Amino acid sequence: MIADLLIELGWKSALACAVALLASQALRGRPAAQRVAVLRAGTGVLLLLPILILTVPAIEIAALPAVAAPSVLPAMPEVGASAVVAAPVMPKIDWIALAYLGGAAFVLLRLAVGLFLLHRWTRHAVPASHPVWREVFARAAEPLRRPVRLLVSPRIASPLSLGVAPATILIDPDIEQRPDRAAAVIAHEIAHVRRFDWLAMLVGRLALALFWFNPFAWLLVAELARQTELAADEEAVRHVARADYAQTLLAVAGGCGAHAACGMAVTRSAMARRIRRVLDTAPRKPASGLACAVLIAGIPLGIAPLAAMQIVARPAVPASPGAESAARQTIPEARPLESSVRKQAVRVAQGLPYRRDKPVPRMAPVPEAMAIPRQFHALSGAPVQVQVPPPPGPGGSFAGTGAAPGDGGSVEQRLAVVERLRAAALEYRDRARTPGLSLDTRKSYRNVSASLADEADKLEKQLQQIAGRR
């Protein structure tokens, strides 16, 4: 079960990430802020995908090769005359689920450690004391409607920002002694705060925890982080000279930024590309609000059909009408079971002792992989074997149960019959969805399921009437 779910999540999330990355690439040459908006929409879609898969009704698309219909129906549990026998089942270890949870736990643990370090650094930080830094910061933070703090911490290697309300900008003591860097650093970090980049970064980390096994998810989050920094650079150079800003980037290059914060630090491998983009004064394509809005709205709107899509096998086509007829003659129909179960339920509901008038037709044996499970889970969660109990007392009476002969058994025994009927109805309903079965076979299974459910409802209503008279 978990393997099928992971496969479905894998290819659907890969398709969603590919669409978001291609949409971002389509905006190449536009402002980085627009590409960030598209990539954020793709990241939000990843978080919604598991919820939609579990809630949206499935839309089956027959795209897989057809599966040949089996020559015999799956074996059905035998309706015996012995009492309900508990069958303990040893729990099996799902290694696939453990591997998935282990990967998700590693990503979340790394994020938790980063958040803990940020909290620790912020708690021991002190407010900036240099008058130039305080003046530049006050002027830049004035348009914001949220509280923002400028703190100095000796534990960080380069400027960074975190939080929403209050937001915090951390700088190290060395750069505080360089007031000529104040305008560039503050402009960059205020851009992160104004655009809620720290919150978007957290959403990206949560998406990675869910889809850590998908390389496209890592590419999407990495591209989002890169475009986020470029968007902050583009906004900062509106307030600072490009040459001064490039010098500041060189000063913080190679610094170790925090994993759970938005930092100004740039790796040496990306330093040349980022500085070249800052110094590039060539005219860019104007911002296209319509194109950006179409791409941002199109990604979430397309996730619902994608989540509902269910790839199934094409229905099998019989080789010839004669072969189909011969197969039907060799397969016992499910209708005799429907009639037998209906008679048994009616007898119990009318207060008559249980009696099996004639044996239920047995189905031909099939491989173990095709067999219907013989165990269901009762309301208590313990596995029990589905069997119809015989009258405990001689002569068809329920001796020792508190019920008179001909009373049909105690309320507890009748409720047990109701539960077994409902469990069998669910089993036949699930079996009717087996790929490869003919339409007549599926219809027979659905009829049996509906008949069992109806008898369970009738018996339950009669029990409620009996309880009301008493």
Image (spheres, rainbow, N blue to C red):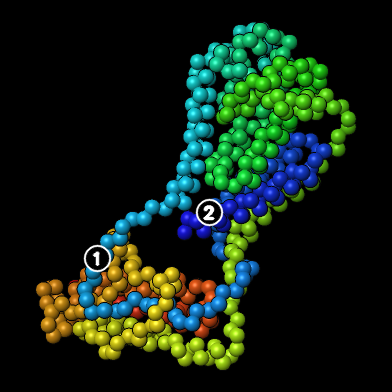
Residue 457 in the image: x percent, y percent?
Answer: 35, 75
Q: Residue at x 61, y 62 (%)?
A: 309
Q: Residue at x 57, y 38 (%)?
A: 205
Measured along the vertical axis of the image, is residue 20 above or below residue 419?
above
Q: Which residue is mark 1?
A: 86
Name which residue type carries label 1. Ala
Residue 189 in the image: x percent, y percent?
Answer: 67, 23
Q: Residue at x 43, y 70 (%)?
A: 369
Residue 312 in the image: x percent, y percent?
Answer: 58, 68
Element carrying mark 2: helix
Q: Which corner quadrant of the image does residue 169 belong to?
A: top right
In the image, is 199 to the left or to the right of 387? right
Residue 172 in the image: x percent, y percent?
Answer: 61, 14
Measured along the vertical axis of the image, is residue 260 above or below residue 203?
above
Q: Residue at x 70, y 9 (%)?
A: 179
Q: Quadrant location of the C terminus?
A: bottom left
In the image, is 422 to the left or to the right of 283? left
Element carrying mark 1: loop
Q: Which corner quadrant of the image does residue 292 belong to?
A: top right
Measured along the vertical axis of the image, is residue 11 above or below residue 201?
below
Q: Which residue is mark 2?
A: 6
Measured along the vertical axis of the image, is residue 336 above or below residue 422?
below
Name which residue type carries label 2. Leu
Residue 342 visible here = no
